[in-house]
Structures are given as structure tokens and as C-alpha cells.
Image: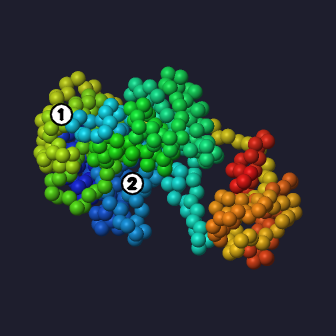
Amino acid sequence: MRTVTLIKGDGIGPEISEAVKLIFSRAGVPIQWEEADAGLGAIERTGTGVPQQTLDSIKKNGVALKGPTTTPVGGGHKSVNVTIRKTLELYANVRLARSLPAVPTRYDGVNILVVRENIEDTYAGIEHMQTPNMAQALKIISRQGSMAVIRYAFEEARKLGRKRVTCVHKANIHKLTDGLFLEVFRQVAAEYTDIEANDIIVDNCCMQLVSRPEQFDVLVLPNLYGDIVSDLCAGIVGGLGVAPGGNIGKDCAVFEAVHGSAPDIAGQGLANPTALLISSVQMLQYMGLVGYAEAIMDALLQTFAAGVKTRDLGGSASTLEFAEAVANNVRHVTDEVQPEPVARVVHPAPTVIEEEWTLVGADVFVEWNGSLPTVPQEFGPLVLKNISSRGTTVWPGEQPDIMLVDHYRCRYIGTNVSNAHITGLLNELDSMGVRWCHVEQLNTANGMVRYSASAGE
């Protein structure tokens, strides 16, 4: 008997959680529930959306099922989902988009597994106001984080008998960040010769998804694209009400409904438990309880085929009536082998790449109200090569007729550059009354640049 942490959540969360508990009980699934607190109710009771006791429960049990939670707008409270994912380092978000019988959509035969990196990218949440009129967010992509999620995608494809893994990216524009993700994908793909591997630019992927979604098998994506594409895939198969989700880490996993808490219909028996139920099926597969997972999924499909649906899908069944119908269709599982506790598969991070970098300059971002900032043309070995605004070159050459803001990037390049030269340049800007707000070193290694091209280069 395994213990699983259950977070019922807010709004309709308790109702759909009870529906899943009913079906599991009727199916005889050999687990017991340990309830934990999170969400809006937890904030009201404990002052935090994710109490430490909840995190401790997930760590102890290794597996959790989570209903939808509400994070208040404003007030400084962090997203419950983001907090859990980051604190427990649940690096892979796994979403299945599968056509279901009696769920009318424009498409048939869709069966896409979306594996989204879950920690990094712009979701690292590193943002700054550079000037009163310019905001900046840092897009963080690491070799180690990319390796973990991409290797997980290939392992899942192999385990589930899927034939192809597609990397979705924007490396034609984000040449270093998405370029690194794509580079790691190709390195990992070379190890899985039994699985076809290809890549596609994210905008083309979205177009292809609404044209011929059946062509895709497994998609692996950085965080932001994965967030968008996974919801697009959910819409293709009927919406978030039938979309399951799992968050996988090195030591534990949290499975969840990805839709909202719908407080407007809470307590009315109108909620659809399908998304949380399919998430619980994924959870059983993760735990090795494959026979029970198949029995419950078959019962759900049989229920849909019989025309028993909740109102959001065009039916008339209440939450409880739908759960009872699924429970009544669950076949008895007699041949399930009780699994050992879930083996913690640790995908090794890549060997840290060490390069001898040569400092060749700096990008200095300055605040300036006017057409062109007055900055030094030279400072020691540093020579001003380019000034850009919002990614467009404004110097050298004829200044383009564009909308200018109070934020400019000044690129300085030189030879035999040291950190002292860069700090000296910053001091010089201070003495001139020019406010610098951000600086990035520019380096080369083995004759290759380790920074993006300046606008216009």
C-alpha cells in the first residue's frame, strides 16, 4: 500500500478530488491518501499558499495528486504551481493531448505527448525595470536543465513505444538560448537511435498543430513555448477540462488538473473531474500500477462512449453521477503485480563544459533622453562599435526613422581587455552624468563569439 499526498485545492478542487477518490476506492487501487493544504484556503489559514508541511508531505511520499488552486491577484503571494515546481525542482511538465470519444472537436486521432521544461526560461522570473520606460526579462536556458528534460522526453517515448520526438524552438532568432536547447537535443537524440528525432520552429509548429495535429507524437519544448503549445494541444482535443498534467522531478512527482478552480460553479455539482482523473491515471502509470491505470482509463472511455458526460461537454450528469458511472465501469484488476517503490531515475547532467574565455568587450546599457547618447568613443582599449535602441542600430550610419526610448545599448570591443577597463568605462560614464543601468561582458572562446550579434551586424 503506497501513500500519496492529496491536495484538494480551491473552488471545484474538493469536488473533483472526491470524484477521483471514489473511483480509486471502487477500483481497489492499493494507495492511501494523505491530505495536504495549498492554495487560497491555505493562505487564509496559514498565511502562505504552500505550507512547509505540504512540501514535506510530497517529499516524504514521492507522489502527489493536486486539484486546481487559486493564487490571489496582487498581494505578493507567489503562484502555488510555480512554488511547488521550483521548490521541488519538478523539471519536466508532461501533458497528454488525446482525442476522446464523444468529445466533439475538429480533429480525430490526436495523441500528442507534450514535455515542457518546467523551471527555466523567462519563468525564472528575473525581471528589471531598466528605465522608467524599459522593462527587461532574462531568458535563462542551461545545458543541465535542457539535458534533464530532453532526456526525460526520449525515455518516456521509449517506455511508451512512441516513435518520434520533435524539438520545438526559435533558434533562428534566439540563437544562443534556444540554440543551446537545440544543440543539447541533437546530442541526446544521437543516443536514441531507435527513435526518430526532428525539430521545428515554434510558430510553424503552431500552424501545423491546427492543420494536421496527427503528425506529431512527442514534443519537447522550453518553458514558455511549452506553456503555450500545451494549451493549444488541449484545445485541439476538447479543452483544459480533459487535459491532464504531471510535473516530474528527480525525487518526486506532482500530477494535477491544469484548468482553473472555477469558483463560480463550486459546490453546484457541475464540475468535470475528467482532467484530474486522467492526471491520476498518469500518476498510476508513473507509480508502476499500470493495470489499474488501464482499467480506469478504459472505464472513462466507456463512460464517454455511453454518452454520460458533464454539462461542459454537452451532457447532463452531475460531478457525482459522472464519477459513479466511471466507477461502475471499472473492471476488476486481478493480474496487477504490486510494484516496488518508484525507482528514482536520476538522469546525469552533462559534463560541465569548461572553456578558456577571452574578454573582448562589453555591452553597456544606458538611460538617455534624446536621439543619441553622448558616450565615450574610446576608453583604453575599448572602442565604441555600435549603439542600438530596442534592437535597431542607431549608430553608426544614418539614424533610422524609428520610435526611440530612453534605453540604449552601447557595444565596446577591443583587444587585451580587462575587467578594470570595463569598470573604468563605467566610472567615466558616471563622471559624465550618463546613467548606466546594465552591463554584460563579451567573450570569445576558441575563436567563436559567446555573445549575440549587435543589431545591424
Of residue 35 and residue 40, the one placed in the foreground of this image is 40
Q: Residue at x 63, y 69 (%)?
A: 405
Q: Is residue 3 left or right of residue 183?
A: left
| Label 2 sits on residue | 81
User: Is disc 1 placed on a helix, strand or loop?
Assistant: helix
Inspect the image, locate mark 2, and give the three-letter code of the amino acid beneath it. Asn
Inspect the image, locate mark 1, and give the three-letter code of the amino acid beneath it. Ala
Q: Is residue 447 left or right of residue 21?
A: right
Of residue 366 and residue 380, the one placed in the foreground of this image is 366
Q: Residue at x 17, y 43 (%)?
A: 309
Q: Residue furthest front?
A: 401
Of residue 186 and residue 158, the one placed in the foreground of this image is 186
Q: Is residue 275 left or right of residue 160?
A: left
Which quadrant of the figure contains the N terminus?
top left
Q: CA distance from mark 2 to mark 1?
A: 33 Å
Q: Does residue 73 appear in the picture of this structure?
A: yes
| Label 1 sits on residue | 305
Of residue 87 and residue 71, the one placed in the foreground of this image is 71
